[in-house]
Structure formats: C-alpha cells, structure tokens
Image (cartoon, rainbow, N blue to C red):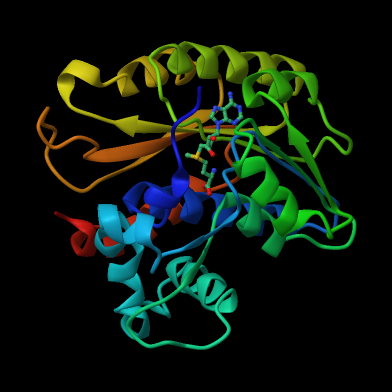
Amino acid sequence: MLSYRHAYHAGNHADVLKHLTLLAILQQLRNKDKAFVGIDTHCGNGFYNLASEPARKTGEAAQGFMRLWQRREQLQNVDLVGDYLALVAGVNPVDTGATIGNYPGSPAIMQSQLREDDRVILMELHSTEIEHLRDNFKRDPRISIHHRDGFEGAVALTPPTPRRGLLLMDPAYENKADYQQAIKAVRAVHRRWPTGIITLWYPMLGQSRDFSSLVKQKLGTVADSVSIELTVAPQSDEFGMHGSGMMIINPPWQLAERVNAALNRIRPLLQV
Ligand SMILES: C[S@@+](CC[C@H](N)C(=O)[O-])C[C@H]1O[C@@H](n2cnc3c(N)ncnc32)[C@H](O)[C@@H]1O
C-alpha cells in the first residue's frame, strides 16, 4: 500500500536540488543536435499547486522554492537558477506576485526540454497518481506512460533507443527496502546501459534513519560518478530531512561545478 503523496512535499528543498540538477542535465543533452531519451521511474503526477491545501499543510514549499520565487528579481541572472525560475514562471499563466500556483514536477521539467525527436518514458505505481499523470501528458506523442514498478521498469526498459539520455530515479523511500532496491536497480541499469546518465535522489535524515552513506558507498565506487548535496539544517533525529543528494553516474562535463555554484548562491536562502 503506497501512502506517499508528492503534493505535500512539492517545491521543498529536496525538489529544488533535484529539479535544478535535472534541468542542468537536460540542458546539456539539448546542446548537441542528437536526440535523447529521458526516463523518469517514480513520477508523481507531474504538476502541483503550491497554494493547495496539502502544500500549505506542511509548509515545505514556503520554506523551499517560494523563498527563491520571492527573490526572483535578484536571482534571475544567476546561472541555472534563472532558467529554473523562468521554467516555473512558464507554467503559470499570470505573474501573481509573491505567491504562485503551479509548480512542475520532474515529468513536466523533462517535457519542457524536449525537441521534436526526443522521447520521454514515465512510470508511476500509485493507482491515483498514474491517472493524473496520464491526464497531464497523454496528449504529447513524444511521451509514453507506464503504470508499473519503477525499479523493475528501469531495468526492463533500458538501454533505450536512442542510447543517448538520462534516467531519474526518485523513490519515496517509504520503507527501508527501497534503499536496497534503488541501489540494485541503478547498478543493473548501469550494466545494461553503460553510457546512460543515471541519477538517484536520496534523503539525508537523522543519524538513526540515515542511509545516505550507504547509497554513496555502494554507488560512489562506480567509475564515473558524483554526488551533489544540499543541506538546510544540521543533522538531528528531531529535525527529519535536513538535506538530500543526487547521485549521478556518467555526469555531463562540469555538471557538479555548475550545480554547486548555483546551490552556493541559494543555500543561505533555504537555511532553516
Ligand atoms: C518523490 S515522488 C516523485 C516526485 C517526482 N519525481 C518529481 O520530482 O516531481 C515518488 C513517487 O513514486 C511513486 N512510487 C512509489 N513506489 C513506486 C514504485 N515502486 N514504482 C514507481 N513509482 C513508485 C509514489 O507514488 C510517488 O508518486
């Protein structure tokens, strides 16, 4: 039984890290005149409303993306951050000032960067989320949508054609077994698709529940890999998720330098 709903967490500091990194990778893939494939194994529904009841209930977006949005005039010329803000502005029909409604999830960020010959494969297991995902993306012929387990689908659907592209794995980590499953799936995908850019998001939690070092230990030894992290508070069992990371296998040239430069500019705004 899946109980996680991304609507409660959309636009939090973890999404800021994940979506900045995703956008930077997609931009680099677009730089060459060759088609690419994007694979998103744990999609959610693709679009969120940061003014909705779930978002207001947790206040996570208010402490995350909204802090950047409120300073968008100062941030619009910061490399990558400006592009991210423009992307979010683009899914909102009117500039509503300090507040904002729509926020794009990872499938929408992938869609925003597609050219005519690029393709995207979306997966989601939750029976309600998959319906919203279908409603949001079924009219785009470049996108295929699967109601299936993303760990299994990641392995079954790789290597894709064409071979150039990226896979994003963004599990909810509702149970401890998700860590082992994610590590296993990423390794299997890398064996099947050695040139693919494979990214895994992981949370950084209080000491008693923190598996981030396991992820880094198991995947950081893959020949060409890097992890990019954003923390917003000191580690403590009381606080919960004080940060998160993106493990990237086969990162594009200077990806970490570019994303880290952007994070250095926004980190002070996101501190708790
Ligand atoms: C963190 S959310 C995804 C957020 C999304 N990647 C984004 O950035 O907008 C994780 C999603 O994975 C879904 N999920 C959980 N277990 C899954 C599985 N085994 N396979 C595919 N999706 C799963 C959940 O229903 C949830 O919608």
Residue 30 point in image, percent of width and height: 73, 59
Please say whether residue 11 is visible from this viewpoint.
yes
Q: Position of residue 1 (x, y in %)?
A: 50, 22
Work out whether residue 247 or residue 64 is closer to the camera in this orientation and state it: 64
* Residue at image coords 39%, 21%: 216
Q: Quadrant of residue 135?
A: bottom right
Q: Residue 202, how many percent across, how many down?
A: 40, 31
Visible residue check, residue 264: no
Q: How many marks?
A: 0
Q: Residue at x 84, y 59 (%)?
A: 140
Q: Is residue 167 left or right of residue 56?
A: right
The residue nearer to you, when weighing 230 against 136, is 136
**In which quadrant is the C terminus drawn?**
bottom left
Decide which of 16, 172 is in the foreground and name it: 172
* Residue 125 horizontal side relative to residue 96, left or right: right
Q: Horizontal placement of 30 versus 213: left or right?
A: right
Is residue 77 shown above or below 248?
below
Q: Where ligand 1 lies, by image quadrant?
A: top right
Based on the displayed image, in which of its 4 quarters is residue 222 positioned? top right
Q: Residue at x 70, y 14 (%)?
A: 191
Q: Position of residue 10 (x, y in %)?
A: 42, 53
* In this view, 231 is above or below 34: above
